[in-house]
Amino acid sequence: MARGSTRPTSRDVAQAAGVSQAAVSLVLGDKWRGRVSETTAERVRQAARELDYRPNLAARNLRLGHTRTILLVVPALTTEFFAGVYTGAARVAAEHGFGVVLYPSPQGVGPAKDPFHSAQAALDGVIASSMAADALTAIRGDRLPLVMLDSDPHGSLGAATVNLDIADGARQVAHHLLAQGHRRFLHLAADIPSWTFETRARELAARLAEVPGTTLRTTHAPISVEDARTAAEAALTTPGPRPTALVCDDDKLAAGAYKAARRLGLRIPDDLSVTGFDDLTLATAIDPELTTVRLDAELFGQRGMEALLAVLNGRTPTEGDIPVELVVRGSTAPPR
């Protein structure tokens, strides 16, 4: 072939490799396994390198009916945690030639208005948090290749599920506070019906029940500082022995608990130990700094995107929950 300024085509690659154009398409589209031999695939790749061939992705996507676009459904764009999830997912997507569209589901749960005339025509796949799962019906996302985040792996809508080890996070909190000598606990739980919060509550109760003499009360609140303050203040003034440890489902809930304690004249951690979940920037902005469970949001998003790409390519996603870590700071201490 005359090189010059003429752009090589897939036909040129096929001729150079001595194969059909269909074989070139399979190899360069990474769909060749089980269809052509490894030797043939390498011959095609070598020909493409020598010719400096670059496939026309736009034309290819139109021809195949794909847009190389992934929808990420999250409860809210203003949440620091889900911003990290997006960052990790978008980085992996970009490395594989995909773009990511963010779709917030109002108030953390659906249904939400369809942002596309036809989700199935506009998207190649969906990644969705369990807290926004109801929105999937509205956008027909449950009919697309789907990976669920933070969801019950035994009842997930998706072809794959990616989870942080939330249960272990709750165990670490319980063991830390029990080791300090706490026996009277208050759980400030997120007022959102989702697998992740149900798992935290169940695991916390199970671990505390293992130690004789412990008591656990639970109160619920929406995830906002002011709602958490109101709920915590009411729970802490309920007749009976006051809890010495307050376990919060989220760092924002913990910040609300700080405000409640201050209003009641309680000192943290002298009168009340407080723990959170997420390790948001907020955790080190309050005083004393918050003992909380660190969740790697970017790695979470990365693993979610890797799982969806595996599904799209007919591979089995990597299994195993993502480890979490209890970060001990100044908000917890032995009870007086």
Image (spheres, helix red, strand yellow):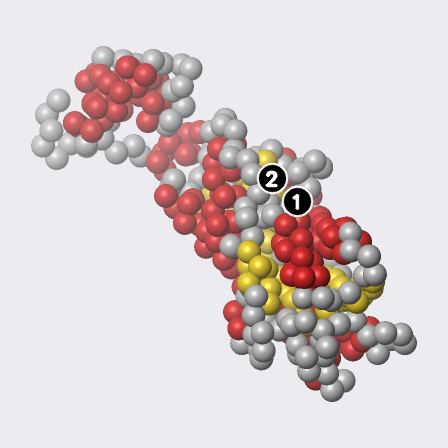
Q: Nearer the viewer, residue 309 or 282?
A: 282
> Are the residues at dot 2 and dot 1 in contact (C-beta closer than 8 Å)?
yes
Q: Which residue is at a point 70% across and 36% down the rendered structure image?
A: 154
For numbered disc 2, what is the local secondary structure?
strand
Give coordinates of residue 310: x percent, y percent. 48, 33
When asked about the image quadrant of residue 10, the answer is: top left
When asked about the image quadrant of residue 15, the answer is: top left
Q: Which residue is at a point 25% across and 24% down the rendered structure image?
A: 45
Q: Which residue is at a point 65% across and 61% down the rendered structure image?
A: 176
Find the distance from the CA under tag 2 to the CA under tag 1.
7 Å
For numbered disc 1, what is the local secondary structure?
loop
Position of 207 with respect to 28 (left or right) is right
Position of 11 with respect to 326 (left or right) is left
Dot 1, how many residues are within 10 Å of its Cα: few (below 14), some (14-19), or many (20+)?
many
Give coordinates of residue 175: x percent, y percent. 67, 57
Kindly identify which residue carries mark 1. Answer: 151
Whether residue 182 is visible here, answered yes or no, is yes
Q: Residue type at mark 1: give it.
A: Ser
Label whose residue precedes the other's in the sequence (2 or 1): 1
Give coordinates of residue 61: x percent, y percent. 41, 34
When asked about the image quadrant of residue 211, the answer is: bottom right
Whether residue 135 is visible here, answered yes or no, is no
Give coordinates of residue 119: x percent, y percent. 58, 42
Position of 41 with respect to 35 (left or right) is left
Q: Quadrant of the C terminus?
A: bottom right
Q: Quadrant of the N terminus?
A: top left
The label number, if any, that marks residue 161 in the structure image: 2
